[in-house]
């Protein structure tokens, strides 16, 4: 949910509406994660108090009323933060600060050219062979550096029939062999609705792989239900899971258990992360993250150079630092544990590698 207040379309609905809708359509498996989501922390004051901190402990000025992209963080994620530490790397991913309101040259609403690649409502087609569905317009957490924090989710499908156009396009284009469910977070859909959408894609003969891009196994591990397992196990296409964790402290406790469980489903589980100033911008931080992942069978995939989206400039790390981190990782880790350092440049035929070979 990431529109500025003045840009909200008539059908804009805050993430809480998802929970309401799901209560109207009971899905017993979903009740516990939805309840957990309803109990997520939504104000900086609550978050800081939970961590035994006050605003004066935090070096930056906190941004309280952030109506376009309000604070949102599930308690499971908060439990992995260190009490009393205003520099906690998980806290800094979610705490809204005044820096977000600065206008910085080069930081724009649609830094990755999503709108230019929109082939149908909810369907982004940038790269040969794979197409991406904006399957849900909300997330369980609001990452302050989000590359789609300005995405106009209100224009994308919600009801099943609104997907007809996108599904038709996919079925007519035999060059597409992989569909990526993204968002927002596709796992914000309750299991029954997610299954309906995924089965429509799975029914298209030339689709060989269905990929989920989701942060929920990390931020709300209880979302990984037995119904979701059945969905993945029952597909004709090969499921591929791409999670999103940025720091080793995220890959702990209930998240770690859930990731181990998903790895046991005999599908690839990959991680992508974003290089973030003050959070994971050292070689040690990245090495620790990679080790935590490979030790449970999750393979590092991409390390993204920050997309230059309005309001995120304070998270940017220089490309030189990014390259240095990757070179150091190469000298200390097995080759498979070093993610590909990439940037998304609009108009390019793939994500652009930034590593010097
Ligand atoms: C990143 C992205 C993909 C996936 O790219 P891969 O390199 O295959 O991971 C696909 N479609 C869109 C629109 C994307 O932004
Ligand atoms: S989970 Fe992804 S899409 Fe959602 S707020 Fe975070 S970065 Fe943005």
Image (cartoon, rainbow, N blue to C red):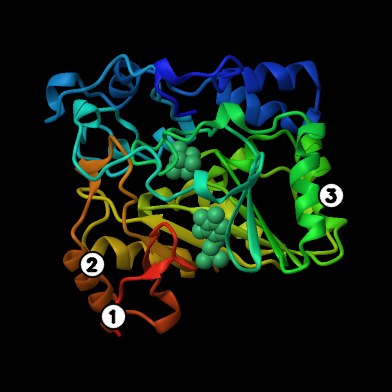
Give the residue drawn at x 34%, y 79%: 333
Residue that label 3 marks:
199
| The residue carrying mark 2 has its beta carbon less than 8 Å from ligand 2 | no
User: Quick one: 232 or 353, which is closer to the camera?
Assistant: 353
Q: Nearer the viewer, mark 1 or mark 3?
A: 3
Quadrant housing residue 259: bottom right
Q: CA distance from mark 1 to mark 3?
A: 42 Å
Residue 73 on image: x %, y % = 44, 30
Residue that label 2 marks:
283
User: Quick one: 80 or 41, which is closer to the camera?
Assistant: 41
| Crowd tier of the residue under label 2, counting other residues whose Cα lies within 10 Å: few below 14, some 14–19, many 20 or above | some
Vertical order, 220 against 177 (above or below):
above
Residue 77 on image: x %, y % = 44, 37
Give the residue drawn at x 81%, y 40%: 164
| Crowd tier of the residue under label 1, counting other residues whose Cα lies within 10 Å: few below 14, some 14–19, many 20 or above | few
Residue that label 1 marks:
332
View quadrant of ligand 1: bottom right
Element on which disc 1 rests: helix
């Amino acid at each position: 949910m990431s529109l500025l207040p003045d840009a909200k379309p008539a059908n804009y609905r805050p993430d809480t509406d998802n929970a309401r809708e799901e209560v109207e359509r009971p899905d017993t498996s979903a009740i516990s994660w939805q309840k957990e989501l309803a109990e997520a922390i939504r104000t900086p004051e609550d978050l800081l108090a939970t961590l035994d901190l006050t605003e004066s402990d935090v070096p930056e000025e906190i941004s309280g009323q952030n109506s376009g992209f309000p604070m949102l963080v599930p308690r499971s994620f908060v439990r992995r933060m260190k009490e009393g530490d205003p520099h906690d790397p998980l806290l800094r991913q979610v705490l809204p600060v005044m820096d977000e309101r600065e206008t910085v040259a080069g930081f724009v609403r649609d830094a990755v050219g999503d709108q230019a690649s929109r082939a149908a409502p909810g369907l982004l087609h940038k790269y040969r062979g794979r197409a991406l569905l904006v399957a849900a317009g909300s997330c369980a957490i609001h990452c302050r550096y989000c590359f789609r924090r300005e995405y106009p989710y209100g224009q994308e499908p919600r009801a099943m029939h609104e997907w007809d156009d996108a599904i038709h396009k996919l079925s007519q284009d035999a060059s597409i062999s992989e569909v990526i469910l993204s968002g927002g977070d596709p796992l914000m859909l309750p299991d029954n609705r997610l299954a309906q959408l995924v089965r429509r894609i799975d029914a298209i003969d030339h689709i060989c792989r269905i990929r989920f891009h989701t942060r929920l196994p990390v931020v709300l591990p209880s979302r990984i239900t037995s119904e979701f397992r059945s969905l993945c196990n029952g597909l004709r296409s090969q499921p591929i899971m791409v999670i999103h964790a940025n720091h080793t402290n995220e890959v702990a406790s209930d998240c770690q258990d859930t990731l181990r469980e998903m790895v046991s489903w005999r599908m690839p589980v990959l991680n992508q992360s974003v290089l973030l100033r003050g959070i994971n911008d050292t070689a040690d931080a990245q090495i620790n993250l990679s080790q935590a992942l490979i030790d449970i069978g999750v393979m590092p995939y991409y390390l993204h150079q920050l997309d230059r989206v309005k309001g995120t400039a304070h998270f940017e790390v220089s490309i030189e630092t990014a390259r240095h981190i990757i070179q150091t990782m190469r000298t200390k880790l097995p080759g498979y544990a070093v993610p590909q350092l990439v940037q998304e440049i609009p108009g390019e035929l793939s994500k652009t590698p930034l590593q010097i070979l």
